[in-house]
Amino acid sequence: MLFTVDPMTGFYCLIAVLLVVGGLVLYNRREQRRRAANKIENLLSEWELKWLASLFECYVIGDYSGLVHKINEILEAANTDEKVAQELEKCVLKVLRHWADADPTRKAKALEALRVVGKVVDQPKANGGPIASPAKV
């Protein structure tokens, strides 16, 4: 025989191949999680939930110390009702606008809801004008 393989050398080669394949599988799973987190981050940003979106952004880029700092900032801001109310107000107005624009019959209900909380500054136009203050949305 021209080529003989020591059993231990063959065993070590098999272990090396299994480690490489296992590493590639685990890497692919991590990348899938990051892509999913990126989609969630984009969705949260679109719906004006910037605090939560910043958490997902830190996870996507792998900035775990930044993630801890963002959590700390959110917890500190959550202790003040005003900041929480401002963040949630943006999101609620965006959801209400989307809900009202989806069906023209809902616009009157949306306007009434905004009047109750005092957010309507413009009367609706015939072409579907603003239902909330542009400064607040």
Image (spheres, rainbow, N blue to C red):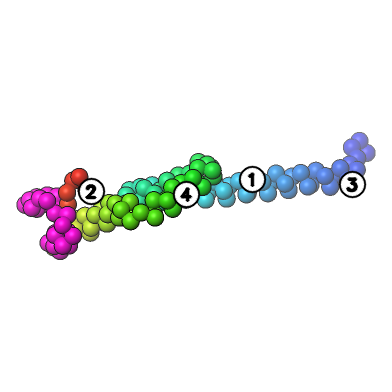
Residue 48: x and y in percent read 32, 49
Highlighted magenta segment, given as a residue range: 107-131
Mark in the foreground, 3 or 2? 2
**Residues marked 4 and 2 touching at CB (< 8 Å):** no
Residue type for callout 3: Pro
- Direction from residue 30 to residue 88 in the image, left or right: left
Secondary structure type for disc 3 = helix
Out of 107 and 2, give the one closest to the viewer.
Answer: 107
Mark in the foreground, 4 or 2? 4
Secondary structure type for disc 1 = helix
* Residue at the image position 51 percent from the left and 47 percent from the top: 68
Out of 15 and 42, give the one closest to the viewer.
Answer: 42
Is residue 113 in the magenta section? Answer: yes
Residue 85: x and y in percent read 30, 55
Mark with earlier residue (4, 1) = 1
Q: What's the distance in space between the residues labelled 4 and 1, CA to CA?
A: 34 Å
Q: What's the distance in space between the residues labelled 4 and 3, CA to CA?
A: 55 Å
Out of 45 and 11, give the one closest to the viewer.
Answer: 45
Residue type for callout 4: Asn
Residue type for callout 2: Val
Mark in the foreground, 3 or 1? 1
Residue 55: x and y in percent read 45, 48
* Residue at the image position 50 percent from the left and 42 percent from the top: 66
Disc 1 crowd rating (10 Å Cα; few below 14, some 14-19, many 20+) is: few
Q: What's the distance in space between the residues labelled 3 and 2, CA to CA?
A: 70 Å
Judging by the rendered image, the residue that carries numbered circle 3 is: 7
- Direction from residue 71 to residue 125 in the image, left or right: left
Q: Residue 46 bears which disc, if any?
A: none
Is residue 123 in the magenta section? Answer: yes
